[in-house]
Amino acid sequence: MVNVLFVCLGNICRSPAAEGVFRSLVEREGLAGRIACDSAGTGSWHVGKVPDARMRAAAKRRGYDLDSLRGRQVTAGDFERFDYVLAMDGENLANLSILCPKGREVRLGRLLDFAPEMGRRDVPDPYYGGADGFERVLDLVEAGARGLLADIRARYL
C-alpha cells in the first residue's frame, strides 16, 4: 500500500481538496486497494472541522465530495506512516521540514513538483480571496494529482 499525505496550513481548503481529488482519481483508476491518502494542516486551528464551505462547493461542482473530511494537525508519526508528505506551498514545506525526523526527508515534497507544466510550485491559499481562487486551487491539485499518480505507478506499481 502506498500512502500519501497532503498538507496545507489549516487543513480546510487546499489539502482536503487535494485529498478529495486524488482519492477520486485513485478510485477511478481501480487502485483504491493499493493507494491511500489523507490530509492534515501544520496548524491546529481547524482540528475536527469540515473543509471550508466554499471549497466544498467548488469541489462538489467538479464531482468531488469533501463533506466527510475533518481537519487534523500533522504529527511526527506521519513521516513513518506516509510514503509521500506533500506540502501545498513553501511555507508549509519549511514547517514540515522542522517536524520531519532525520532520515525521513526523502518523503517530503510539494504537490506541484508533480505538475511542472503548471509553471508554479505553490498552490495558493484561497481562504481570503474570491470564488475564483478555489477554482484555481482545484485546477492545480487536479494537475498535481495526475502527475503524482504517474510517479506512484512508475515507482511502486
Image (cartoon, grey):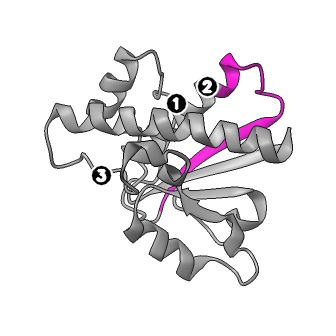
If you read the primary sequence from the N terminus, does the residue marked by circle 2 or circle 3 appear first? 2
- Quadrant of the rendered image containing residue 28: top right
Residue 25, numbered circle: 2
Horizontally, is 90 left or right of 144 in the view?
Answer: left
Horizontally, is 12 left or right of 98 in the view?
Answer: left
Specify the amino acid type for callout 3: Pro
The residue lying toward the viewer, choosing from 5 and 145, is: 145
**Residue shown at 24% from the left, 45% from the top:** 126
Q: Which residues are magenta?
A: 26-41
Q: Residues within 10 Å of mark 3 (few under 14, many from 20)?
A: some
* Residue to which mark 3 is pinned: 124
Rounded to the nearest angstrom, the CA distance separating label 3 from label 1 is: 16 Å
The residue lying toward the viewer, choosing from 91 and 116, is: 116
If you read the primary sequence from the N terminus, does the residue marked by circle 3 or circle 1 appear first? 1
Q: Is residue 78 magenta?
A: no
Asked which secondary structure carries label 3, the reply is loop
Residues at marks 2 and 3 touching, judged by CB atoms closer than 8 Å: no
Q: Quadrant of the N terminus?
A: top right
Asked which secondary structure carries label 1, the reply is helix
Specify the amino acid type for callout 1: Val
Asked which secondary structure carries label 2, the reply is helix
**Picture coordinates of residue 111 (x, y %)?**
52, 51
**Picture coordinates of residue 42 (x, y %)?**
46, 65
**Residue shown at 36% from the left, 28% from the top:** 56
Horizontally, is 5 left or right of 63 in the view?
Answer: right
Residues at marks 2 and 1 touching, judged by CB atoms closer than 8 Å: yes
